[in-house]
Image (spheres, grey):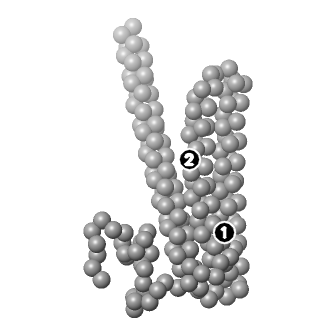
Amino acid sequence: MSQQWGGPPGGGLGGVPMAGPGGEAPLGRIPFSSDDEKNIQQTALFMRISGALAVLGALFGLVGSVGVNLYTGAPPLGGVCFGTIMLSVEALMATLLFLAANAFASIVATDGNDQQHLAEGLRKLRVYFLVKAILWVLAFITCCLCASLFVFVGAAIFSAIGAAAGSQ
Protein backbone atom coordinates (compact mmCIF):
# COMPACT_ATOMS: atom_id res chain seq x y z
CA MET A 1 0.00 0.00 0.00
CA SER A 2 1.50 3.32 -0.99
CA GLN A 3 1.49 6.20 1.49
CA GLN A 4 -0.35 9.27 0.27
CA TRP A 5 1.44 12.49 1.12
CA GLY A 6 -0.67 14.80 3.23
CA GLY A 7 -3.07 12.03 4.24
CA PRO A 8 -3.37 10.48 7.70
CA PRO A 9 -0.93 7.67 8.53
CA GLY A 10 -2.36 4.23 7.94
CA GLY A 11 -4.76 5.52 5.28
CA GLY A 12 -8.49 5.79 5.80
CA LEU A 13 -10.14 8.48 7.84
CA GLY A 14 -8.39 9.80 10.90
CA GLY A 15 -5.61 7.20 10.86
CA VAL A 16 -7.99 4.23 11.01
CA PRO A 17 -7.25 1.88 8.13
CA MET A 18 -10.24 1.20 5.93
CA ALA A 19 -9.20 -2.42 5.60
CA GLY A 20 -7.09 -4.74 7.71
CA PRO A 21 -3.72 -6.15 6.67
CA GLY A 22 -5.31 -8.90 4.60
CA GLY A 23 -7.75 -6.52 2.91
CA GLU A 24 -10.62 -7.34 5.27
CA ALA A 25 -12.84 -4.64 6.75
CA PRO A 26 -12.24 -3.36 10.30
CA LEU A 27 -13.76 -5.40 13.08
CA GLY A 28 -17.36 -4.42 13.71
CA ARG A 29 -17.69 -6.38 16.91
CA ILE A 30 -14.68 -7.30 19.04
CA PRO A 31 -15.50 -10.30 21.24
CA PHE A 32 -14.68 -8.93 24.70
CA SER A 33 -15.35 -11.06 27.75
CA SER A 34 -17.92 -9.80 30.23
CA ASP A 35 -15.09 -8.80 32.60
CA ASP A 36 -13.41 -6.83 29.82
CA GLU A 37 -16.65 -5.04 28.99
CA LYS A 38 -17.14 -4.23 32.66
CA ASN A 39 -13.59 -2.83 32.82
CA ILE A 40 -14.22 -0.72 29.71
CA GLN A 41 -17.43 0.67 31.24
CA GLN A 42 -15.67 1.44 34.53
CA THR A 43 -12.79 3.10 32.69
CA ALA A 44 -15.25 5.33 30.83
CA LEU A 45 -17.00 6.17 34.12
CA PHE A 46 -13.73 7.07 35.86
CA MET A 47 -12.67 9.24 32.91
CA ARG A 48 -15.94 11.17 33.23
CA ILE A 49 -15.53 11.50 37.01
CA SER A 50 -11.92 12.65 36.60
CA GLY A 51 -12.92 15.28 34.05
CA ALA A 52 -15.76 16.56 36.21
CA LEU A 53 -13.54 16.75 39.31
CA ALA A 54 -10.85 18.61 37.37
CA VAL A 55 -13.36 21.25 36.24
CA LEU A 56 -14.80 21.46 39.76
CA GLY A 57 -11.31 21.89 41.22
CA ALA A 58 -10.50 24.67 38.75
CA LEU A 59 -13.80 26.37 39.60
CA PHE A 60 -12.97 26.22 43.31
CA GLY A 61 -9.51 27.60 42.50
CA LEU A 62 -11.09 30.52 40.66
CA VAL A 63 -13.44 31.29 43.55
CA GLY A 64 -10.60 30.83 46.07
CA SER A 65 -8.19 33.15 44.26
CA VAL A 66 -10.85 35.85 43.98
CA GLY A 67 -11.71 35.38 47.66
CA VAL A 68 -8.07 35.66 48.75
CA ASN A 69 -7.63 38.81 46.67
CA LEU A 70 -10.76 40.36 48.16
CA TYR A 71 -9.70 39.40 51.71
CA THR A 72 -6.22 40.87 51.32
CA GLY A 73 -7.53 44.00 49.62
CA ALA A 74 -5.64 43.29 46.40
CA PRO A 75 -7.44 43.91 43.14
CA PRO A 76 -9.13 40.66 42.11
CA LEU A 77 -8.34 41.07 38.42
CA GLY A 78 -5.16 38.96 38.54
CA GLY A 79 -6.90 36.15 40.39
CA VAL A 80 -9.84 36.26 38.01
CA CYS A 81 -7.58 36.17 34.94
CA PHE A 82 -5.43 33.31 36.25
CA GLY A 83 -8.46 31.41 37.54
CA THR A 84 -10.30 31.83 34.25
CA ILE A 85 -7.30 30.57 32.28
CA MET A 86 -6.98 27.54 34.55
CA LEU A 87 -10.71 26.88 34.33
CA SER A 88 -10.67 26.99 30.54
CA VAL A 89 -7.63 24.69 30.33
CA GLU A 90 -9.25 22.19 32.69
CA ALA A 91 -12.50 22.41 30.71
CA LEU A 92 -10.56 21.59 27.53
CA MET A 93 -8.87 18.66 29.23
CA ALA A 94 -12.18 17.44 30.64
CA THR A 95 -13.73 17.65 27.18
CA LEU A 96 -11.01 15.39 25.82
CA LEU A 97 -11.65 12.93 28.65
CA PHE A 98 -15.40 13.02 28.05
CA LEU A 99 -14.91 12.38 24.32
CA ALA A 100 -12.61 9.45 25.05
CA ALA A 101 -15.07 8.12 27.63
CA ASN A 102 -17.91 8.30 25.10
CA ALA A 103 -15.84 6.38 22.57
CA PHE A 104 -14.99 3.68 25.12
CA ALA A 105 -18.60 3.47 26.30
CA SER A 106 -19.69 3.05 22.66
CA ILE A 107 -17.56 -0.10 22.43
CA VAL A 108 -19.80 -1.81 24.97
CA ALA A 109 -23.06 -0.03 24.18
CA THR A 110 -23.14 -0.72 20.44
CA ASP A 111 -22.82 -3.89 18.42
CA GLY A 112 -20.75 -2.43 15.62
CA ASN A 113 -17.71 -0.35 14.82
CA ASP A 114 -15.85 -1.50 17.92
CA GLN A 115 -12.48 -1.08 16.26
CA GLN A 116 -13.28 2.49 15.21
CA HIS A 117 -14.60 3.34 18.69
CA LEU A 118 -11.50 1.89 20.30
CA ALA A 119 -9.18 3.76 17.92
CA GLU A 120 -11.12 7.00 18.47
CA GLY A 121 -10.93 6.64 22.25
CA LEU A 122 -7.20 5.95 22.12
CA ARG A 123 -6.64 8.97 19.84
CA LYS A 124 -8.49 11.22 22.29
CA LEU A 125 -6.46 9.85 25.19
CA ARG A 126 -3.26 10.42 23.22
CA VAL A 127 -4.18 14.07 22.67
CA TYR A 128 -5.14 14.41 26.35
CA PHE A 129 -1.80 13.07 27.57
CA LEU A 130 0.14 15.05 24.97
CA VAL A 131 -1.49 18.31 26.06
CA LYS A 132 -0.98 17.37 29.71
CA ALA A 133 2.73 16.70 29.09
CA ILE A 134 3.14 20.02 27.25
CA LEU A 135 1.47 21.85 30.13
CA TRP A 136 3.80 20.16 32.65
CA VAL A 137 6.84 21.11 30.60
CA LEU A 138 5.62 24.72 30.34
CA ALA A 139 4.98 24.80 34.10
CA PHE A 140 8.47 23.44 34.79
CA ILE A 141 10.07 26.00 32.46
CA THR A 142 8.06 28.78 34.12
CA CYS A 143 9.21 27.64 37.58
CA CYS A 144 12.83 27.54 36.41
CA LEU A 145 12.55 31.03 34.91
CA CYS A 146 10.95 32.39 38.08
CA ALA A 147 13.65 30.80 40.26
CA SER A 148 16.37 32.24 38.01
CA LEU A 149 14.77 35.67 38.11
CA PHE A 150 14.53 35.46 41.89
CA VAL A 151 18.22 34.53 42.19
CA PHE A 152 19.40 37.23 39.77
CA VAL A 153 17.23 39.98 41.25
CA GLY A 154 18.23 38.91 44.75
CA ALA A 155 21.90 38.99 43.80
CA ALA A 156 21.47 42.44 42.27
CA ILE A 157 19.72 43.75 45.39
CA PHE A 158 22.39 42.34 47.72
CA SER A 159 25.10 43.72 45.45
CA ALA A 160 23.50 47.17 45.59
CA ILE A 161 23.16 46.96 49.36
CA GLY A 162 26.78 45.89 49.67
CA ALA A 163 27.95 48.69 47.41
CA ALA A 164 25.91 51.25 49.36
CA ALA A 165 27.25 49.98 52.70
CA GLY A 166 30.84 49.95 51.39
CA SER A 167 30.67 53.56 50.19
CA GLN A 168 29.65 54.93 53.57
Secondary structure under the numbered disc 1 in the rendered image: helix
Please identify the residue farthest to the bottom as the structure is shown. 22
Q: Position of residue 127 (x, y in %)?
A: 49, 61
How far is mark 2 from mark 1, CA to CA?
21 Å
Q: Position of residue 49 (x, y in %)?
A: 70, 60
Residue 129 appears in the figure: no
Alpha-carbon neighbours of circle 2 within 10 Å: few (<14), some, or many (≥20)? some
Quadrant occupied by the C terminus: top left
Residue 12 appears in the figure: yes
Q: Tell me: residue 78, above or below residue 99.
A: above
Which residue sits at x=60%, y=49%?
Answer: 91
Secondary structure under the numbered disc 2 in the rendered image: helix
Give the mark, 2 or 1, whose residue is nearer the N terminus.
1
Q: Tell me: residue 115, above or below residue 71.
A: below
Please identify the residue farthest to the top as the structure is shown. 168
Q: Looking at the rendering, which quadrant does residue 105 occupy?
A: bottom right
* Horizontal relation, residue 12 to residue 61: left or right: left
Residue that mark 1 sits on:
44
Tell me, for residue 59, which label it has, or none. Answer: none
Alpha-carbon neighbours of circle 1 within 10 Å: few (<14), some, or many (≥20)? many
Q: Position of residue 25 (x, y in %)?
A: 46, 86
Residue that mark 2 sits on:
89
Quadrant occupied by the N terminus: bottom left
Q: Amino acid at mark 1?
A: Ala
The foreground one among 135 and 29 is 29
Q: Amino acid at mark 2?
A: Val
Whether tag 2 and tag 1 are in contact, CB under 8 A, the answer is no
The foreground one among 51 and 120 is 120
* Horizontal relation, residue 111 to residue 19: left or right: right
Which residue sits at x=56%, y=40%?
Answer: 85
* Horizontal relation, residue 25 to residue 58: left or right: left
